[in-house]
């Protein structure tokens, strides 16, 4: 989902700064809630895990350029389910920043564009979870249909933001339409694969319920 440098530039970048600032403000709210619920010592390791996971997703998992952007297996809903909203949001932002600073410096000018594209769909998936997860259901007991909804909202949100930035930065043209359409079609593969990754991660978390690993994960995994 990396928007290529130059797609949004100049004065148009002001909107990206504004949307990223809004995402940062919402993240701060989630961080405060998380600290109140479990303390900073619980939040810190989950954030580190989310940042490390984000880096792995971007750098080590297969990724390829398609149309206006790149297709990545971001697994944002996996981070959300295992670690919680606040750690996932900070981890995505930090992982993206680390990648840009040390491995892909050409992506840094687009950081605000890309971080918005990652975080706003995460918040949408978090909001959806509060509606579609039945009361009293722990995340480790989620069904495929529920996980699919969360993944579709997250990945669909990523595609929607990529399309928005493309049309906002480059205008509506046959070339842009074709490029966005190609990217969106390729991303369907991620939407199909991610729910399976989520279910595998939840199954692993369920089997680790009584181990020390469970203490590094969000309490919402095991209790409603």
Image (cartoon, rainbow, N blue to C red):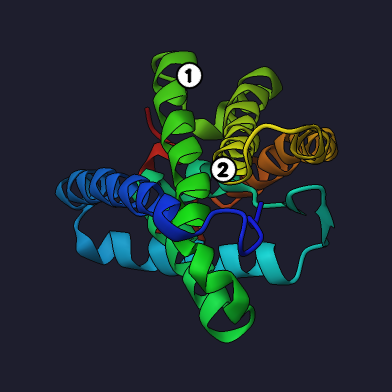
Report the quarter where the C terminus lies: top left
Disc on the earlier residue, 2 or 1: 1
The residue drawn where x is 70% and y is 71% is: 59
Q: Is residue 158 left or right of residue 109?
A: right
Say if mark 2 contacts mark 1, CB within 8 Å: no
Q: Is residue 212 visible?
A: no
The residue drawn where x is 49% and y is 15% is: 132
Q: How far apart are the two marked residues, 2 and 1, measured between alpha carbons?
A: 31 Å
Nearer the observer: mark 2 or 1; the answer is 2
Using the image as rendered, state which of residue 122 and residue 145 is in the foreground. 122
Q: Give percent across and percent down for residue 14.
A: 35, 52
Residue 165's disc number: 2
Q: Give percent across and percent down for residue 196.
A: 76, 37
Element assignment for label 1? loop
Q: Is residue 173 left or right of residue 130?
A: right
Q: Indicate the quadrant where residue 13 lies.
A: bottom left
Q: Is residue 186 visible?
A: yes
Q: Give percent across and percent down for residue 58.
A: 67, 64
Location of mark 1 (residue): 133
Position of 77 relative to 50 (above/below): above
Q: Is residue 10 left or right of residue 2?
A: left
The residue drawn where x is 80% and y is 32% is: 174
Element assignment for label 2? helix
Using the image as rendered, state which of residue 54 and residue 200 is in the foreground. 54
């Amino acid at each position: 989902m990396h928007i290529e440098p130059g797609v949004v530039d100049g004065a148009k970048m002001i909107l990206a700064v504004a949307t990223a600032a809004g995402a940062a403000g919402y993240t701060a709210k989630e961080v405060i809630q998380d600290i109140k619920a479990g303390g900073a010592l619980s939040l810190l390791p989950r954030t580190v895990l989310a940042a490390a996971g984000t880096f792995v997703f971007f750098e080590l998992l297969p990724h390829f350029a398609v149309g206006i952007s790149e297709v990545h297996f971001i697994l944002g809903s996996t981070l959300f389910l295992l670690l919680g909203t606040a750690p996932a949001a900070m981890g995505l932002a930090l992982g993206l920043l680390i990648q840009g600073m040390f491995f892909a410096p050409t992506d840094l000018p687009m950081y605000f564009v890309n971080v918005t594209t990652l975080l706003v769909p995460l918040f949408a998936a978090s909001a959806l979870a509060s509606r579609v997860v039945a009361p009293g259901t722990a995340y480790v007991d989620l069904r495929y249909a529920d996980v699919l909804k969360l993944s579709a909202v997250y990945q669909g949100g990523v595609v929607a933001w990529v399309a928005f930035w493309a049309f906002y930065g480059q205008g509506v043209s046959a070339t842009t339409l074709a490029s966005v359409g190609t990217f969106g079609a390729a991303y369907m593969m991620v939407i199909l694969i991610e729910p399976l990754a989520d279910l595998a991660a939840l199954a692993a978390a369920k089997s680790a319920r009584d181990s020390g690993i469970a203490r590094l994960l969000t309490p919402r995994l095991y209790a409603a």
